């Protein structure tokens, strides 16, 4: 027997519950919905999103960071709290980065603004200090020279590059410094190894290539297609050079082909003079012209071992004869004097002579 049969009053009450529209005395008060904050632990003062956005924009402006660029390149920046940005600033400051340079770095690499310092940034500092063994005062120099260190993975990029460079010869007195840590951000397979293979293709042994790179680390930063190959071609074909000289002076690749190498070579050809790569490239423009003029005078006088003191015969010696007096040499007890005819003196030579005679 069911409970309804035993106690029907449970289902059919003698006094049914009055309904609002049947009982005018029934007063149903609908209370307004309470705030969700009333039922949570959070206070009922949630910050305005627009206000947070403006605070972050103002903060970026104070660091000299372009907010529009930063928000565009790092969309996560829109939703992260302002404390995240400030923690990154404190982290970079602990590395010795001044606030003025910090803005330049963060504007260049906006993805840094939302990095977790303990997970992403401090491991890089630890790597530079204890594995690369960069002195703490030089860490900031490494970062300022190559900010990409801060966005490179220690496991996937920095440590493999360090192992490759040490095998190449960057050990002991040639260990990486704050000047060469920028090589660590380069991929071994895509960047470093192709440069080594290119130099090996010129006929150098691996040891010779290692010595060249250690003496001129910039070789590993230059493009094979746009830099190394064109300079080798010009050196071999136009300058009739010997690759052995590249081994003696690997810094040749660091000079601009159009801005220095070609103009200097053309100048030597015009004067009919031959110099080593180091003599041709390492001196200043004025130093090279000075050297060429002295070599020209030696050729005219016919005594290669003499050193010259020059005296113009007038303030404007172009088109006039110039007296060239040589100091005494083991072959001559007395100074020798000769004259250069007017056809052999140019206005440019005259300027050099005036400069020498005033010294």
Image (tube, helix red, strand yellow):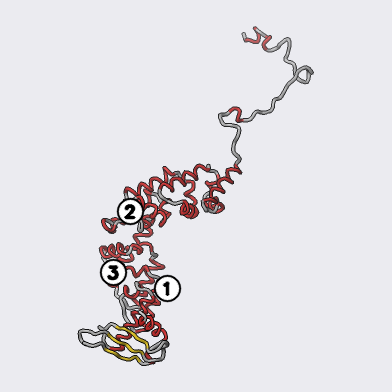
Q: Quadrant of residue 242?
A: bottom left
Picture layout, residue 266 above or below residue 185 = below
10 Å crowding of disc 1: few (<14), some (14-19), many (20+): few
x and y, in percent, of residue 333 in the image = 21, 87
Q: Which mark is residue 259?
A: 1
The answer to whether mark 2 and mark 3 are in CB contact below 8 A is no
Of residue 42 and residue 309, the one placed in the foreground of this image is: 309
Q: Quadrant of residue 211?
A: bottom left
Q: Nearer the viewer, mark 1 or mark 2?
A: 1
Q: Earlier in the sequence, mark 1 or mark 3?
A: 3
Of residue 224 and residue 173, the one placed in the foreground of this image is: 173
* CA distance for labels 1 and 3: 22 Å
- The quadrant of the picture occupied by the C terminus is bottom left
Picture layout, residue 256 above or below residue 103 = below
Q: Nearer the viewer, mark 1 or mark 3?
A: 1
Decide if residue 42 is on the left or right side of residue 345. Answer: right
Number of marks present in the image shown: 3
x and y, in percent, of residue 101 in the image = 46, 54
In the image, what residue occupies the spot 35% across and 48% down?
127
x and y, in percent, of residue 108 in the image = 48, 55
Secondary structure beneath dot 3 equals: helix
Q: Which mark is residue 247?
A: 3
In the image, what residue occupies the spot 54% across and 54% down?
66
User: As drawn, which residue projects farthest toward the top?
Assistant: 6
* CA distance for labels 2 and 3: 24 Å
In the image, what residue occupies the spot 31% across and 78% down?
275
- Residue where numbered disc 2 is placed: 162
């Amino acid at each position: 027997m069911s409970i309804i049969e035993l106690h029907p009053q449970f289902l059919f009450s003698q006094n049914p519950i009055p309904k609002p529209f049947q009982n005018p005395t029934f007063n149903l008060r609908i209370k307004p919905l309470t705030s969700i904050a009333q039922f949570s632990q959070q206070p009922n003062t949630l910050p305005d999103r627009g206000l947070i956005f403006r605070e972050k924009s103002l903060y970026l402006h104070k660091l000299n960071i372009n907010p529009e660029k930063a928000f565009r390149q790092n969309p996560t920046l829109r939703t992260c709290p302002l404390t995240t940005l400030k923690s990154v600033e404190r982290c970079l400051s602990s590395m010795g980065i001044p606030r003025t340079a910090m803005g330049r770095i963060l504007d260049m690499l906006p993805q840094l603004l939302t990095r977790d310092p303990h997970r992403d940034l401090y491991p890089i500092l630890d790597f530079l200090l204890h594995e690369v063994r960069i002195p703490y005062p030089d860490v900031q120099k490494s970062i300022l020279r190559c900010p990409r260190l801060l966005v490179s993975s220690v496991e996937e990029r920095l440590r493999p590059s360090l192992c490759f460079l040490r095998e190449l010869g960057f050990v002991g007195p040639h260990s990486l410094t704050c000047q060469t840590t920028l090589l660590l951000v380069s991929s071994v397979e895509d960047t470093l190894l192709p440069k080594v293979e290119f130099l090996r293709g010129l006929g150098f042994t691996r040891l010779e290539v290692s010595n060249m790179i250690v003496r001129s680390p910039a070789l590993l930063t230059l493009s094979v297609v746009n830099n190394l190959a064109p300079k080798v071609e010009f050196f071999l074909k136009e300058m009739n050079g010997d690759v052995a000289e590249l081994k003696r002076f690997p810094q040749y690749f660091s000079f601009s082909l159009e801005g220095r190498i070609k103009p200097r070579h053309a100048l030597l050809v015009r004067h009919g003079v031959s110099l080593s790569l180091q003599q041709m490239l390492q001196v200043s423009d004025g130093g090279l012209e000075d050297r060429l003029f002295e070599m020209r005078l030696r050729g005219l006088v016919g005594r290669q071992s003499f050193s010259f003191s020059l005296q113009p015969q007038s303030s404007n010696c172009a088109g006039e004869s110039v007296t060239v007096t040589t100091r005494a040499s083991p072959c001559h007890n007395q100074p020798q004097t000769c004259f250069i005819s007017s056809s052999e003196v140019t206005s440019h030579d005259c300027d050099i002579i005036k400069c020498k005679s005033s010294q």
